[in-house]
Image (cartoon, grey):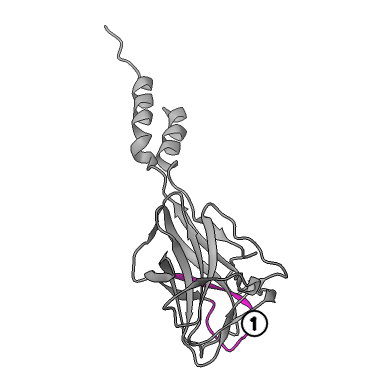
Amino acid sequence: MKRLLPIVAAVLFAGQVHAALVLGNLSTTTPGAQLSFGSTTTINAVQSKAVSFTVDEDFRLGSVYLGLSNFDDADVFDVFLGSLSGTVITKVAQLSLTAPVRSQDNSALVWQFNLTGLSEFLLQPGTTYALTLMGGSTTSYTWGREGLDPIPPTGPANFGNYYFSNDSGVTYNVSTDTHLTNSFAIDGTPLPLPAPITLLPAGLVLLALRRPRLRAN
């Protein structure tokens, strides 16, 4: 019986997975970490940036990380996950700043955003998602690009395009400007078949086979 306990434990916990990169091109996802921007474009009150992607399997959305600079406690912004159809992005999940604490520091840093108002959000096949940052300040700030050359986003998700809006997010157009290849990362938890349901019967069978049999008198 003792030798079977590790097997049963493995069966019960085989379905537990941890958050991992879904898509991104940041060298670090440590909030507040310093970045070196090779290219930047500002975002003002009527401008927005977005990056589109699709997934081939279900993911539970985790944290989102953006490389931002000139971003302080006076800036007004809206960061969200949207669904993209043509030139229109419709908000489906609101994100709020988690770390670091906003200050007057205008350095290029990693900023972490998490889901707001929902207990969870599932990324699912069949939808084109758009990670979007919409301006709203009287001043401007930057969602920049780390490094001298554009870094292609990688991960199990499928990168689409970078988008830009000059009309307060009413319409978005694909950007061919390399200065708009912004740095970001999205993490999440893949949703496999639940191991306790699919594998537990096999573990119970093993236990039954190993039970000591009563000897006949």
- Graded by Cα atoms within 10 Å as few (under 14), some (14 to 19) or many (20 or more), the crowding at tag 1 reads some
Where is residue 98 shown, x and y percent of the image? 48, 74
Q: Is residue 151 visible?
A: yes
Tell me which segment is drawn in magenta: 100-115
Which kind of residue does numbered mark 1 sit on?
Ser
Q: Is residue 10 above or below residue 69?
A: above
- Disc 1 is placed on an element classified as loop
Give the farthest residue toward the right.
148
Q: Which residue is more in the foreground, 65 or 91? A: 91
Give the farthest residue toward the left.
217
Q: Which residue is more in the foreground, 129 or 202? A: 129
Q: Which image quadrant for residue 127?
A: bottom left
Whether the magenta-drawn stretch holds residue 114 is answered as: yes
Which residue carries the number 1 mark? 107
Q: Which residue is more in the foreground, 2 or 187? A: 187
Where is residue 84 shown, x and y percent of the image? 42, 65
Q: Is residue 55 above or below residue 175?
A: above
The quadrant in which the N terminus is found is: top left
- Write the residue at 47% across / 28% down: 3
Q: Which image quadrant for residue 41?
A: bottom right
Q: Is residue 182 above or below residue 214?
A: below
Where is residue 90 shown, x and y percent of the image? 38, 70
Q: Is residue 115 visible?
A: no
